[in-house]
Amino acid sequence: QRFQRAHRALGSDSTEGFAAARYTMMQRTAAFADAVGVEEDEAETSLGYRDDRLGNGLQMALRLFERNVGLRVVHVTMDGGFDTHEGHAWKYQELMSAFDDNLGAFFAELDQRGIADRVLVATMSEFGRTVGENGSGGLDHGAASSMLLFGPVRPGPHGEAPTFSGLSAEDGLPSAVPFDRYFATLAEQWFGVSAD
């Protein structure tokens, strides 16, 4: 707390351009630190979130968006991971259940606060899975995966549905939308940055 008070005060009487700009940035940093930190009297009940990396990360993201600290992107990861080389059937079901619970709680809170139209959740993975099971009841690395968008977006599938014809069990689905196009679309449609 002493550090934060000093941080806020340092350069507050500055009129010189660079020092004044540095002071402004320090104030933003302090506001960001306040938003990330949870004080005891501020702690809330779970409201449907799971006590895992995704649930805790989404609750932190909500605080950051709600306090309007100027942040545009928050990256949140999940516990466990989708690298299901064995036991895919039960692991995938549990992962998606946790994903559903946490996002349901997150969007319920966004709606309560009236900011759901300002938040887009975009999922990503660096690999997909094979079409058929391996010898351990799992799926190995494949070419493509599903990317999901939640929020104020046009509902339904985007891009062409992948075809299963001609694929062996060891093959992954071919990519219908390249990774760079996915991110370029988000940059252009959400942030107003040219896809070029």
Image (cartoon, grey):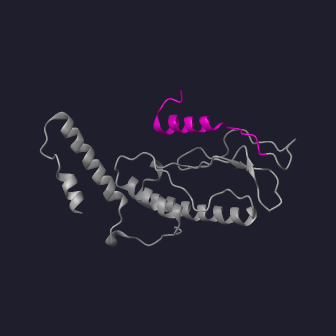
| Residue at 54% in and 56% down | 77
Q: Is 107 positioned to the left or the right of 4 in the image?
A: right
Q: Position of residue 63 (x, y in %)?
A: 39, 58
- Name of the residue lying farthest toward the top: 196
Quadrant occupied by the N terminus: bottom left
Tally the marks: 0
Q: Compare residues 41 and 130 and report the one nearer the observer.
A: 130
Q: Is 97 positioned to the left or the right of 170 in the image?
A: left
Q: From which residue to which does the magenta span run?
A: 172-196
Q: Is 46 positioned to the left or the right of 145 in the image?
A: left
* Quadrant in the picture for residue 22: top left
Residue 74 in the image: above or below residue 57: above
Q: Position of residue 143 (x, y in %)?
A: 72, 43
Q: Compare residues 151 and 3 and report the one nearer the observer.
A: 3
Residue 23 in the image: above or below residue 18: below
Q: Is residue 52 magenta?
A: no
Residue 153 in the image: above or below residue 108: above
Q: Position of residue 141 (x, y in %)?
A: 73, 49
Q: Is residue 192 magenta?
A: yes
Q: Position of residue 154 (x, y in %)?
A: 59, 44
Q: Is 26 positioned to the left or the right of 139 in the image?
A: left
| Residue at 69% in and 47% down | 145
| Residue at 34% in and 55% down | 67
